[in-house]
Image: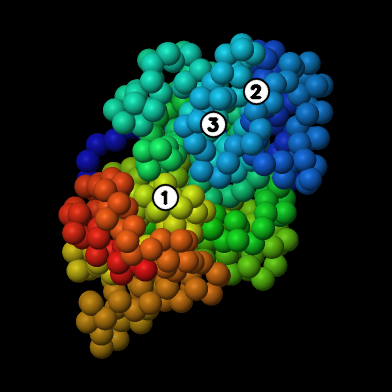
Amino acid sequence: MNGNFTYCNPTKLYFGKNALDGLNIELKKYGKNILFVYGGGSIKQNGIYDKVIEILKINNKNIFEDSGVMPNPTIEKLKDGIDKARKAKIDFILAVGGGSVCDYAKALSVSINCYEDIWDKYFIRFEDVSCKIVPIGCVLTMAGTGSEMNGGTVITNHEAKLKIGHVFNENVYPKFSILNPEFTYTLPKYQMVAGIYDIMSHILEQYFSGNDDNTSDYISEGLMRSLIKSANIAIKNPLDYEARSNIMWTATWALNTLIAKGKSEDWMVHMLGQAIGAFTNATHGMTLSSVTMAYYRFILPYGIEKFKRFAINVWGVNQDNKSELEIANEGLEKMEEWMQSIGLIMNISELGVKEDMIDDLVKSTLIMDGGYKVLSENDIKKIFKDSL
């Protein structure tokens, strides 16, 4: 392993069918005024809302609701939530939902006591928090983002045509997260599949960087093999607890910073996908899948050693009488076949992108420098065109 690093993850996890019991334990540690954050109301239909409300009442909390968090939380929604939280003098934020709800809650936590321009401070200048942070906890209803155990938040600004993430330090991490795989059962198949690919992409973004013998890469390969197997089972039987629990656990470890240690990181697939999301409001996981093959085929010549390893260790490609390039390409072919088999969107035109939008997409794409090649704007344009 190369480099020096510090590892800290302060989030406490409650996992399994009885995980919600942990909410009783944790709520006692925080103040009276709770902001209950959730999305479009599916938690009212599946019964999770009532269960959480009951626990909040048992613990004598004052409940203030902030509902309607959209799949790609906007700066307008964030400003509205800040106003609600300030008026209620919120002591604690409880996010119940998927990754977008958790992301939004973290953005709220660092903004309630901040009286600067939030978008400019956190998403343009990428400054650290300089105000008091309101603590948060998460009850997860979708596996995918890993937001339940990290400091990341992604906010969309439609006016600026930008969707930008800011990864905060561990002081912004959820204090606890509750992970009951059964809470993901009622998720529509499209959202489940999108979440599965978000997990895969998180691992790949960290895996495809560096060529040193790194323990993190061995962990990543195991996570990917587990995800592929469990995804294949869950597609056929969404109520398979073992498969759904493995997917949920893999999602957490894919982005809680563990497998990034000792490595550079790529994240260009996410930058490309987020640009698409800013223009189309498409589901995040599908924006990633739609550009994946074009991107990895473009950078394969610059990282052929790792792509060969990926083909052999993750996809079981036979090496006999094949060149490095043939092995690497076969690995990508197997990944593409798997992606198609589980129902992912494989091109950006299906998400509403037209060729005349590409120049604007290029301008909205942030360029990262941790992968095998730093892309030029012409490179990005080619990748988008190859993704149509």
Residue annotated with mark 2: 35
Q: Measuring 41% from the left and 61% from the top, which residue is drawn there?
A: 353
- Identify the secondary structure beneath mark 3: helix
Residue annotated with mark 1: 279
Location of residue 68 by image quarter: top right
- Identify the secondary structure beneath mark 1: helix
* Quadrant containing the C terminus in the rendered view: bottom left
Residue annotated with mark 3: 77
Lower position in the chain sequence, tag 3 or tag 2: 2
Lower position in the chain sequence, tag 3 or tag 1: 3
Residue 70 — which label? none
Instruction: Determine the CA span between mark 3 and mark 1.
Output: 17 Å
Instruction: Determine the CA span between mark 3 and mark 2.
Output: 15 Å
Question: Is label 3 or label 2 in front?
Answer: 3
- Identify the secondary structure beneath mark 2: strand
Q: Measuring 50% from the left and 54% from the top, which residue is drawn there?
A: 282
